[in-house]
Image: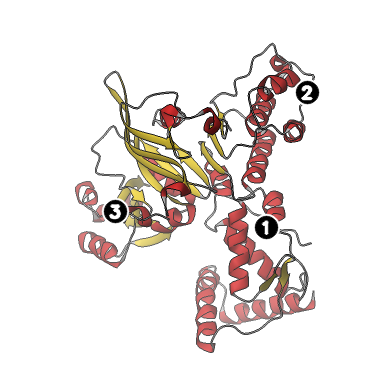
Amino acid sequence: MLPIRVSTGGKVPIYRQVIDQIRSAIVSDRLRVGDSLPSVRALAGELVVNPNTIAKAYAELVRDGVLESQQGRGYFVAKRREIYTKKERNRRLQESMEPFLAEAVSLGFGEQEIVERIQKQLQHMFSS
Amino acid sequence: MSDDQFAIQLRKLNRYFGRKHVVRDLNLRVPKGQVTALLGLNGAGKTTTIRMLMGLLAPTRGHASVLGEDALAMSTGTRAKVGYLVEGHFLYPSMRVRDCQSFQRAGYPTWNDHLFVDIVDHFGIDRQAKVSTLSRGQRAGVALALVLAPDPELLVLDDPALGLDPVSRRALNETLVEFAGNGKRTVLLSTHLIDDVERIADRVAVMVGGRLKVDTSLDEFVGRVSMLSLPESSIDADQLASLTGLIEARRLGSGTTARWQLTLVDVDESATNQIERLSGTPPERMEATLNEAVLAYLVRERGDGSFFSKPLIAKANEEGATV
């Protein structure tokens, strides 16, 4: 099972940290379609967080079509499918790009450099 | 939500000690199946509130009910369903751990010896050891095992993490997460450790000077508190005081870079417009972390009548309905 780790005191709520780590594990193929996830209680115990927080993270991942819950068997990585409209996907992409690009530009990276770094990161993600 | 969905209901609870008004018009409902954290500075009235809801102290005015019964007249059957950990992890020093176990077991109709042993083991405690030889963390473990072994429906913990080392603190949190894990048991705990609250609580209640200033879910609390930053020279303190929703204002830095860091509740467009009109500059906005949101309430602790510290009560509660 993938190691999930959470920290407190930051701007990202714990349920969001759990969601982000599961999503990124799926994108980088550390979790594959059909893989099972720990139960809500097991993961809550492991991370020492309120079980409702884990339940909330799983519920959001199920709603977004990332996980599926099978009655009595637990949570599994779902087959990838498009559940958003094209417009919504574009909006979400835009929303996540803005802070990233603002940070990159303010750190002094030029256009070419940013594009290259993104390409490199994508290659790394898909090759691992 | 109907009344029986709350484990604890406090209505207009007040308590004086002499002329000192320690708890003021406290209305608090603790929903069943959730973990509620009660925060506040020392002296804010947390322990007094807990003692009143445990029926150990009569309110000067107001009413406390626990599991549907008047806190001052709880039946023994109901009392056995409530686990209460007093502040300071008190145990009789001359007893051995296993004596504490059999002593407490005799007082409860339900008692789970396996659970007691599991918790004591989890804290690394030898059951043959005398209480007087235990560390603070180990005493906390025994005290916790004693309240959990009867499998209470409601657990009330008064500052359980007080004086614990990091390992015992983790063991405490693990035990609480495990205990609350089935969603049927209710926990109310007072604490100063905001990081632990972020991990284990569903709801947060903040007391300031005897009053309840915050009572909502963790997510709603963090979602409704924001921070704004403004150049110090652009606005004066009197103008700040008139801002809608201001919880706290801090002056940071000095000279030309000095600025106000404002913490506000429910900042919407009209609030930012108001600030921009007063100061002449659009404020820079940041989301607050749980730490920052709680601290903003605690820092401004004043006796009474402060215009700061706008209360943040769950929207659902304000409207007479509940969450």
The numbered dot on residue B257 is none
The numbered dot on residue B245 is 3
Between B165 and B103, the one nearer to me in the picture: B103
Res. A72 visible in picture: yes
Which callout, 3 or 1, points to the residue nearer the camera? 1
Q: Kindly indicate whether the residues beneath marks 3 and 1 are on one polypeptide chain.
A: no
Q: Kindly indicate whether the residues beneath marks 2 and 1 are on one polypeptide chain.
A: no
Q: How would you rate the neighbour count of disc 3 (Cα within 10 Å): few for under 14, some for 14-19, many for 20 or more?
A: many
Q: Report x, y in % for residue B133.
A: 72, 16
**Location of residue B221 with respect to B179 vertically, above or below:** below
Q: Is residue B92 left or right of residue B204?
A: right
Position of the N terminus of chain A by quadrant = bottom right
Question: Label 2: which residue?
Answer: B127
Lower sequence index among marks 3 and 2: 2
**Location of residue B6 with respect to B55 vertically, above or below:** below
Question: Label 1: which residue?
Answer: A40
Quadrant assignment, res B179: top right
Secondary structure found at label 3: loop
